[in-house]
Image (tube, helix red, strand yellow):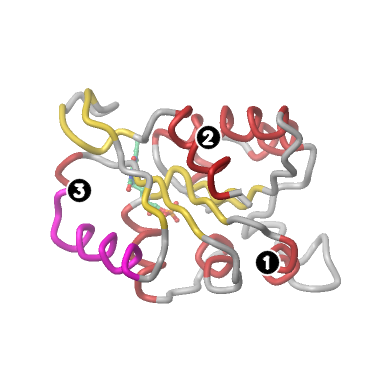
Amino acid sequence: MLGVTGSIAAFRAADVTSALRKEGIDVRVVMSAYAKRFIGELTFSTLSGRPVITDANVGDFADRPEHLALGDVADLFVVAPATANILAKMAHGLADDIVSTTYISVTCPVMVAPAMNTRMYDHVTVRENVATLRARGVTVIEPDDGFLACGDYGKGRLAATDTILAAIRNAL
Ligand SMILES: Cc1cc2nc3c(=O)[nH]c(=O)nc-3n(C[C@H](O)[C@H](O)[C@H](O)COP(=O)(O)O)c2cc1C
């Protein structure tokens, strides 16, 4: 299961979805409302061959709520890209949208691939939330150093697609 949140790097999750499906992995995508401002759910439904679950359509597909139905079958939950916001919600147990609710509904291993401006990634709240998640057993796919979409330079760029794919294959 792939959670996509509202980062400029959200388009890179399309490559992850496509590559996994080509390897025969069944990918189910859940998207935050903000993620939909960066990339359309049609991209993910086409690439995954599955309906994409968002807050706008949750409840439409299953007789069991989707966050539970998906959690029943998920082998791995990966949030990529993971915003500062979803990291905070995951660290503190907030469940106010489909991505955060799914996190606290799954029993499978969880991974996050943070992506954000370097000042955000350096902020003490983000560092503490990442540390909390790591201590809880969540695998953190560290962001890379480099030029960021905003023009700044530093750590915060979503990890390379191959790095994310290798981490997923390894976990599966
Ligand atoms: C152009 C633009 C790019 C953004 N990129 C990021 C990002 O890479 N990482 C991040 O944590 N937040 C980013 N944000 C802010 C998030 O979209 C915002 O915090 C939002 O509330 C996240 O919601 P979500 O976690 O539910 O998707 C960006 C906002 C804008 C307008």
Q: Is 4 positioned to the left or the right of 132 in the image?
A: right
Query: At 74% across and 62% down in the image, what residue appears?
Result: 73
Amino acid identity at mark 2: Leu
Label 1 residue SS: helix
Q: Residues within 10 Å of mark 1 (few under 14, many from 20)?
A: many
Location of residue 158 by image quarter: top left
Image coords of residue 143 (percent x, y): 30, 39
Disc 2 C-beta below 8 A from ligand 1:
no
- Residue 120: mark: 3
Name the disc covering residue 7, or none. Answer: none
| Residue at figure coordinates x 25%, y 28% from the top left | 148
Q: Is mark 1 within 8 Å of ligand 1?
A: no
Q: Left or right of 60: which side holds 106? A: left
Asked whether the residues under the numbered discs 1 and 3 touch, taking CB atoms below 8 Å apart as contact, a structural biologist would say no
- Of badges 2 and 3, nearer the viewer stands 2
Q: Residue drawn at (50%, 65%), measured in percent from left and top?
A: 100
Mark 3 and ligand 1: say if the CB distance to the nearest ligand atom is below 8 Å.
yes
Query: Residue type at mark 3?
Result: Met
Marks 1 and 2 sit apart, C-alpha to C-alpha, by 21 Å
Label 2 and label 3: CA atoms lie apart by 25 Å
Q: Is residue 145 left or right of residue 74?
A: left
**Residues shaded magenta:** 120-135
